Structures are given as C-alpha cells and as structure tokens.
Amino acid sequence: MIEPVASLAPLDASARVSVTDQVFEALHAQVLSLALPPGAKLSEAEVAKKLGVSRQPVRDAFFRLSKLGFLVIQPQRATTVSKIHVQDVRRARFIRTAIEVEVMRLAAARFTAQDFAALDANMEAQAAAVKAGDRSTFHRLDDAFHQMLCARTGVEFVWDAIRENKAHTDRVRFLSLAEGSQRAFDDHVRILAMLRAGDAAGSVAAMRDHLGAIEAIIQQLRSENHSWFSDDED
C-alpha cells in the first residue's frame, strides 16, 4: 500500500528556495520525524499531487534522499523509506566520535569568552525547546551546537564530513528525543563546563560519552520498533 502522506501540504509558491529544495525539506522532515517510518511506500505522483508540484522536483528530491540513505528507489517498484541499518549507525558514530574528540582537544585550548557567549545563547534556546517538548527545534539546535563547536575551534570544514555521515544516526537521535532531550541537554551542559575549565581530558570524555550514548538508544528503540531496524550491511 502506498503511504498516503496525508500530512504533506501544498508548497509556498512565494518561497525563495527552489521547488526541489522545498520538496526535499518537506520529505526529509517526514522521514526524520518517523511520520514516514521505515518501510513506508511512496509514490512520486501522490507526493507531487499533495505538494502541488510536477513530478520532476519530486523525482529529484527522492534521488537526494536516496543518496543520504533515507529512501530505496527500485525501478518498476514502489520507492520505500529505508530501514535503519545498525551497522551504518555504528560506523557514523565512530567517524563522528573520532572527529569531535579532536575538536574538544582544540576547543579546550582555543575557546574565548566570545565563543562561550555564542554557545550559551544556543544553550538557552535548547533549554526552552526541552521545556516546550519541541523535538524538532531541539534537534536543529543540537546540530547547531555541534557545528558551532567545530566552527569556533577553527575547523568548520570537518562539519562537512560529520554531516555526510550523520544522516544514518538522525532518525535514531530524533526518535530518542521523545524521552531523551533532557539527557542530551545535560550532556551539552557537561561538555561546556569541561571546556570552560580548560579541561581537555574532561571535554574529550564528556563528548565521547555523549556520542556513545547512541548504542544504548539503539537497543532500546529496537526493542520497541524491531521492524524499523536491520542488521544487514546494505
């Protein structure tokens, strides 16, 4: 059965971004939030109708999402939302940890009062999102927090490598935020406390623990939504 994508609505024709980008963002949000869960079937024609666009931008958005690992496109068969591949999540976590641990070592030595002020503003917004139970906003601020750590350490280019890999973990992270936003926020508080103290070893340990928490999250979520996960390599 083709997923009805009932929550999709016509796009804003006055928006400055391209139609393809708008279609991509709309579908990305649906997949990330699990409104379109693993295994859901999608039709180019139906998505185009719901969004009020032609099929070409939908086809282009489908392709972009497939490159991120979110969709499985098979000729002459329905396009489906991919399962969450545990091995891909673990590989992405390994790569991200290796990078961000080094960022912590640099940040502990380089951060200035201005850097902390910028991160404090982000943390205030995170706290508000946690209080409001706004997972989408918290997820966006969480990403911004980590990107700022890279940028303000002078190695913003490493965020490109993180972003290329983190799509595999994004659905797991988002799903965990139903219960885990406060825990993630508390981790960020600890990371900043270690950085303020100039404690490189403490900063590294805090970041390693923060990113490593996804292993326990995987086990919990798999027990609740077993059909969404796969141990296969591809």
Image: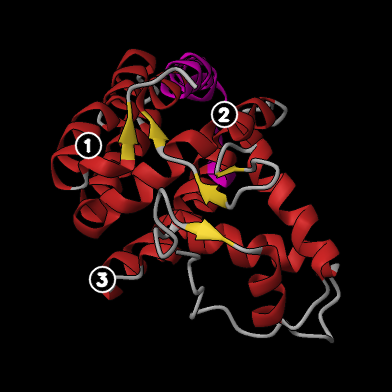
Question: Which span is picked out in magenta?
Answer: 92-115
Q: Which residue is mark 1?
A: 217
Q: Quadrant of residue 218?
A: top left
Amino acid type at image mark 1 = Ile
Amino acid type shown at disc 2 = Asn
Q: Is residue 44 above or below residue 32?
A: below
Residue at image coords 22%, 37%: 217
Residue bearing the label numbered 2: 165
Q: Position of residue 208 (x, y in %)?
A: 33, 21
Picture residue at 55% right of the left edge, 44% below the top = 70
Residue 162 at x, y percent in the picture: 58, 29
Which SS class for mark 1? helix
Mark 3 vs 2, N-terminal side: 3
Q: CA distance from mark 1 to mark 3?
A: 21 Å
Q: Which is more N-terminal, label 1 or label 2?
A: 2
Reply yes or no: does residue 113 show up in magenta. Answer: yes
**Disc nearer the start of the sequence (1/3):** 3
Residue 131 numbered tag: 3
Q: Nearer the viewer, mark 3 or mark 2?
A: 2
**Would you call the spot at circle 3 few (<14 residues within 10 Å), some (14-19), or many (20 or more)?**
few
**Whole-Å distance between the Cαs marked 2 and 1?**
18 Å
Q: For the residue labelled by badge 3, is the local secondary structure a helix, a strand or a loop?
A: helix
At label 3, which amino acid type do we have? Lys
Numbered disc 2: secondary structure: helix
Q: Residues within 10 Å of mark 1 (few under 14, many from 20)?
A: some
Disc 3 to disc 2, C-alpha distance: 29 Å
| Residue 90 horizontal/vertical position (percent) | 38, 21
Number of marks in the rendered image: 3
Q: Identify the main secondary structure in magenta.
A: helix
Locate residue 172 relative to residue 97 in the image: left or right. Answer: left
Q: Nearer the viewer, mark 1 or mark 3?
A: 1
* Residue 129 x %, y %: 36, 68
